[in-house]
Image (cartoon, grey):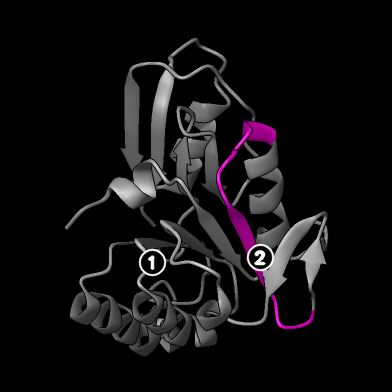
Amino acid sequence: MDLTPLLEPRSIAVVGATDRPDAYGDTILRNLERLGFDGPLYGVNPGRSEIRGIECVATVDDLPEPVDAVAVAIPAAAVPDAVEAIARRGCGGAVVVSAGFGEVGTGVSLECRLRDVARAAGLPVCGPNGNGVVSFAAGAGIWGDSVQALEPGPVALISQSGNVAVNALGSHRGIGFHTVVSTG
């Protein structure tokens, strides 16, 4: 399974794109702007044609191209269908920051369905219920919390815990991160 589309995306879509403050879809769009992502960027929001100058489409199927990475920031119940659409559209992978899966009893069946959809399609998925992926070299902050732009260095961090990754990013210890992944 090729993880390059998630770790070095050249194009990104955000399912759940919004300009509502404190929403994951807004935070991810702001991170991408802050980190200087310069590839094609699309929002997926059935109620908007654009958000802060970013073109929005109603569904993943309406994307003008299969993008490398798709951030999924919508309620858990809709995530498996969104990931199915991401695979059908031929996108490279998904970063699911949504919560409400195996970490709560009522979400176990949703997580099983998400897993089954991704496996059947051979689609790499980071998450659910994680902060996501930051690639400073690619200017790609597909991350559920605010992240500041840093000069890319040689260090990669993979953490199950989003809090560990958030604290590492904010430590100001000159670690020199290239990529940070919070798997969820």
Up the image or down, 38 lies above or below 21; here it is: above
Q: Residues within 10 Å of mark 1 (few under 14, many from 20)?
A: many
Report the side of 55 relative to 72 (left or right).
right
Q: Residue furthest front?
A: 64
Disc 2 marks which amino acid?
Gly
- Compare residues 175 and 51 and report the one nearer the observer: 51
Image point (34%, 32%), residue name: 157
Magenta part of the chain:
34-47
Q: Residue at x 53, y 16 (%)?
A: 151
User: In the image as oriented, which residue stretches furthest toward the top?
Assistant: 174
Mark identifier at residue 8: none
Q: Left of 35 or right of it: where is 18?
A: right
Give the left or right position of residue 15, taking residue 86 as reference.
right
Q: Quick check: can you spot residue 90? A: yes
Q: Is residue 41 magenta?
A: yes
Magenta-span inclusion, residue 96: no
Residue that badge 1 annotates: 91
Farthest-out residue, left? 1
- Expressed as whole percent of the image width and height from the top left, the position of residue 27 reads 69, 51
Q: Mark 1 and mark 2 in contact? Answer it, CB < 8 Å.
A: no
Rate crowding at label 2 as few (under 14), some (14 to 19) or many (20 or more) other CA atoms within 10 Å. Answer: many
